[in-house]
Image: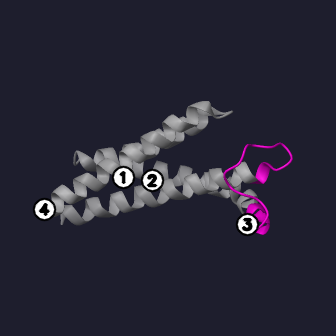
Amino acid sequence: MFTLATKTIHLLFALTLVAFAYLQLNDPDPVVWTLFYLICAVVPLLELINKRNRYVFWIAVGLCILDMGIYTHGAYTYYLHSNEEALMQSMSPAKPYIEEAREFLGSLIALVLINISYWLGSKTRV
């Protein structure tokens, strides 16, 4: 039962990250973000088929941390304006921090999903 539940979680995480990649196709920089989410989706996919690759995991973690580092300032600026600005609104050149906060949040979600997937994969191997 634990294995079926774990495999289901890996599949859901992979599908979530692939959906994130698909949603990036209409972004101003689709190649960067689509590849980012697809690389992250490989981690739960490999766990799903019991082909763990720690190099792929660490590359994905590194990309998440790098992206979060790049967009930390925008996320913090959005936090300061969060009472007056909705996160889900059209992009505006006057308010780039809204898009940067979204990018930060997407990277954080990806980081959480790949870490949970990797951790669950290690628990089922023990």
Q: Are marks 3 and 1 in contact (CB under 8 Å)?
A: no
Q: Which of marks 3 and 1 is in front?
A: 3
Residue at which label 1 appears: 54
Q: Which of marks 4 and 1 is in front?
A: 4
Q: Position of residue 108 (x, y in %)?
A: 55, 58
Q: Which of marks 4 and 1 is nearer the N terminus?
A: 4
Say whether residue 111 is magenta.
no
Q: In which quarter of the image is residue 116?
A: bottom left
Q: Which of marks 4 and 3 is nearer the N terminus?
A: 4
> Residue 1's mark?
4
Q: Which of marks 2 and 4 is in front?
A: 4
Q: Which of marks 2 and 4 is nearer the N terminus?
A: 4
Q: What stretch is highlighted in magenta?
A: 76-97
Local crowd size for mark 4, using a 10 Å CA cut-off: few (<14), some (14–19), many (≥20): few
Magenta stretch, overall SS: loop
Comparing 118 with 6, the one in front is 6
The amino acid on which the numbered mark 1 sits, given as a three-letter code, is Arg
Q: Tell me the CA gap for discs 4 and 3.
A: 42 Å
Residue at which label 3 appears: 79
| 34 sits left or right of 48 in the view | right
- Helix, strand or loop under label 1: helix
Q: Do the residues labelled 3 and 2 touch (CB within 8 Å)?
A: no
Q: Are marks 2 and 1 in contact (CB under 8 Å)?
A: yes
Local crowd size for mark 3, using a 10 Å CA cut-off: few (<14), some (14–19), many (≥20): some
| 23 sits left or right of 121 in the view | right
Residue at which label 2 appears: 58
